[in-house]
Image (cartoon, grey):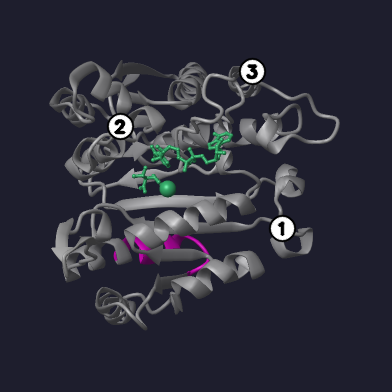
Amino acid sequence: MQTYQIAVLKGDGIGPEIVEQAMKVLTKAGQKFGFAVQFQQALLGGAAIDADGVPLPQKTVDICKAADSTLLGAVGGPKWDGQPGSNRPEKGLLGIRSALGLFANLRPAVIFPELKSASPLKDEIIGDNLDVLIVRELIGGIYFGERGRCIENGQEAAYDTEKYSVPEIERIVRVGFQMAMKRRKKMCSVDKANVLESSRLWRATVQRLSKEYPEVEVSYMYVDNCAMQLVRNPRQFDVIVTSNMFGDILSDEASMISGSIGMLASASLNDTKCGLYEPIHGSAPDIAGTGKANPLATVLSAAMMLRYSLDQPQAADAIEAAVSNALTKGRTCDIAGKGLPVLSCSEMGDLVCSLL
Ligand code: NAD
Ligand code: IPM
Ligand code: MN
């Protein structure tokens, strides 16, 4: 039987609760579709700081590199907010993304029809089958640029720099084009080319590459306008390709279209099959340990893992169908529906398993 080695980084806050549900679902999917999964846990973020003093121990990198794929919860929390920037839990997350070369982050904002009423947007704005894919550059830009503190005019100052090279832009933009080719053949490149030099190089690169993808209808939008258009008329978008920071912000915004940030999954990919899969939300310290966390973003990230890394598209489809079905039977409180039981995080995981 095919056996997959999955590195598991539960992280902090709600991380352990949500990841456990995704592990249950992956195991159940394996039983149904004839494969086995072996999980190897490793520390990341605050949990790693507490155990080893650093947010990304080398052992964690080694375990992820040796695995077929990595499943991640979330990192961070008030306990570690006093850490210096170089030793914060989030630095561990950026470190593992970079160590694995995961330059392409796919964040699909999809609305399950059952959840239309959970979205703050009106029905006629959401329409049917809303499906926007945000392709976010993940290991460059201001997140990884030079930063520091200095003294300016006798006053303390700080700086962070946004820098993108042409190869860095090309590889992520190509992912955007390739995704668009498999979808509705529309790609919107989002930047701030009216102000930022890095955005002007980004836009020029997209324009040049667009000649190689004549079937794709390309548009350009400034990020501030895009933030507005996502709530005014999200259906105008198919694929959005954008930089690290803009993609971070726009994907949290887009998640609410789908009803809750607890619904939005992601895949982080490099040129190999070995990806990292995580929900887009954080460690939600405000609800950690209460059982209120919605595990579906993590469960749907596991489905993306089956599709993009493990060549099990049928199992991925089955998980997505089970999630859709589960939404008609019970919900966590972030997406509570009239007349439906409110489920805890683990009850939701069990429900998805039972419907698989
Ligand atoms: P957050 O995403 O953790 O929480 C924002 C809000 O959404 C909170 O009210 C939270 O309760 C809610 N929420 C998030 N996920 C939910 C879920 N699955 N179910 C129900 N509700 C959910 O963002 P934040 O509060 O800005 O950040 C908290 C910590 O998480 C910070 O330390 C931050 O750096 C970290 N963070 C980590 C990641 C990651 O590991 N990928 C992502 C974002 C934020
Ligand atoms: C995300 C998170 C991370 C990011 C943080 C925690 C470093 O917000 O995955 O969206 O900004 O990439
Ligand atoms: Mn984010």
- Classed neighbour count for the residue bearing mark 1: other residues with Cα under 10 Å, few (<14), some (14–19), many (≥20): some
Q: In the picture, which quadrant includes the N terminus?
A: top left
Q: Residue at x 39, y 44 (%)?
A: 267
| Secondary element type, mark 1 | loop
**Residue labelled with disc 3:** 347
- Front-most of 349 and 27? 349
Going from N to C along the chain, the mark reached first, 1 or 3, is: 1
Mark 2 C-beta closer than 8 Å to ligand 1: no
| Nearest to viewer (mark 2 / mark 3) | 3
Q: Which x, y percent locates residue 297? A: 52, 37
Image: magenta residue range: 174-186
**Residue labelled with disc 2:** 69
Q: Say whether marks 2 and 3 touch (CB < 8 Å).
A: no
Q: Is residue 314 left or right of residue 337?
A: left
Q: Amino acid at mark 2?
A: Ser
| Nearest to viewer (mark 1 / mark 3) | 1
Q: Which x, y percent locates residue 168? A: 21, 63
| Secondary element type, mark 2 | strand
| Secondary element type, mark 3 | helix
